Amino acid sequence: MAFQYLDDETLQAVRMAAVELGFNSEGNLAALAADISPAYIGGAMVGPNGNAKLLTLTASMNQTRSLVSGEVPLEKWLNMAIILAAGKQQELVFRKALERMAADSIPEAGEAPDVVAAPRTDGGSLEIQIDEDDTLGVGFLLHGAIAARSVAKLRVHRHFDGTPAFRAGGEPDFGLGTGWLIGPSLAVTNYHVINARAKSEPDASQADFELQGKSTQADFDYYDGSLATVTVPALECVAADRALDFAVLRLDAGVAERRPLRLRGNPLTRPQASALRERVNVLQHPAGNPMRLGFRNNFVVTGSNEKLSYLTDTAGGSSGSPICDDAWHVAGLHRGWTTIDGDPVKVWGKEIRQENYGTPIGQIIAHLAAGNPDLHAEIREGQDALG
């Protein structure tokens, strides 16, 4: 089956929404493609009229995983369409399409969503209280810098039928994500990061999954593209679970001097009727870029033993990031985002249409304790050594 980001029904909905908004005019077609490689657009957007150009371009973008530069044309086009839709009903069509093409955004067929509906007032707003001191001690920054040394960009070399895949020009075909040290020489990330498959592709076979775990490269200290980046290879994937969306990699000894991140002993909680107070911070490598910190408007929306959702900013490539509290203790493993149906929620007058979600760290530890006691003991020993 040929690669495609969107199924036929979703792609047709995008086209219909674009036509309804007049995006098939020459000016709008040019505006939507403004951030995409002109060489690609010149060959993909063809036809005698605007409708034909819209059809050919969307068909081509849907089957183009990425350009040699790494850019994803469909992702850029949809983001521009969201901007141009400017709050109209069709904006949600483009947002849903963008969500469907993201590998870390949609629960598997037949699964219930990982997050419950965000609690809202009748006006569609999240309750918020702005009457307390939001300043933090400067130790927040110092301890955050220490925590950042234990977070890495992950490059997963995709394999098919036992053979490593390469892009045009001979570049390795890497899936990207984020991982962090959960124990001595042990890194945790998402199952879907190591699976390294787009939504339209079949899952990696068990043999390919294992090969991809072994071929993963962890880039530590990747802050600004300087030579200070330290690359540590993975030796094997020692544990994984699709339902909880986690995978644990054993890394080469080159990571031995880095400390594991400390895990929270209790879950972050937020009763649905309460105001937004708890916050989480996410160290991440969005789109494989140098590390960024999401810590603005970073409220916990849903918090319990089973669920954790939040408004902290992330992006593709952030999958597998640690969800940290203000003491930099890990509360969960970031895994994706979901679109909020219906009225958007509002925080400080800003409309929010997505929320991020992760697996509470307690669920992962309990799963390992039950199914992999030796690995669980190794992680616990490393946590105890932190003092």
Image (cartoon, helix red, strand yellow):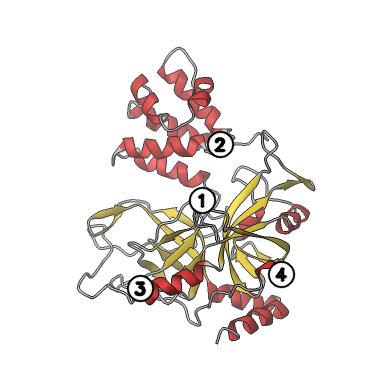
In this picture, residue 83 sits left or right of residue 70: left
Where is residue 133, by image quadrant?
A: bottom left
Residue situated furthest top in the rendering? 48
Q: Of label 3 and label 4, which has the lower sequence position?
A: 4
In contact (CB < 8 Å): disc 4 and disc 1: no
Name which residue type carries label 2: Ser
Could you say which is closer to the camera, residue 230 or residue 219? 230
Which numbered dot is residue 253? 4
Q: Position of residue 129 (x, y in %)?
A: 23, 70
Marks 2 and 1 sit apart, C-alpha to C-alpha, by 13 Å
Q: Of label 2 and label 1, which has the lower sequence position?
A: 2
Marks 4 and 1 sit apart, C-alpha to C-alpha, by 25 Å
In contact (CB < 8 Å): disc 1 and disc 3: no
Label 1, on which residue? 289
Could you say which is closer to the camera, residue 371 or residue 83? 83
Q: Quick one: SS at disc 1?
A: loop
Q: Position of residue 181 (x, y in %)?
A: 60, 70
Name which residue type carries label 3: Glu
Residue 188 vs 49, above or below: the answer is below
> Which of label 2 and label 3 is nearer to you?
2
> Which of label 3 and label 4 is nearer to you?
4
> Which of label 1 and label 3 is nearer to you?
1
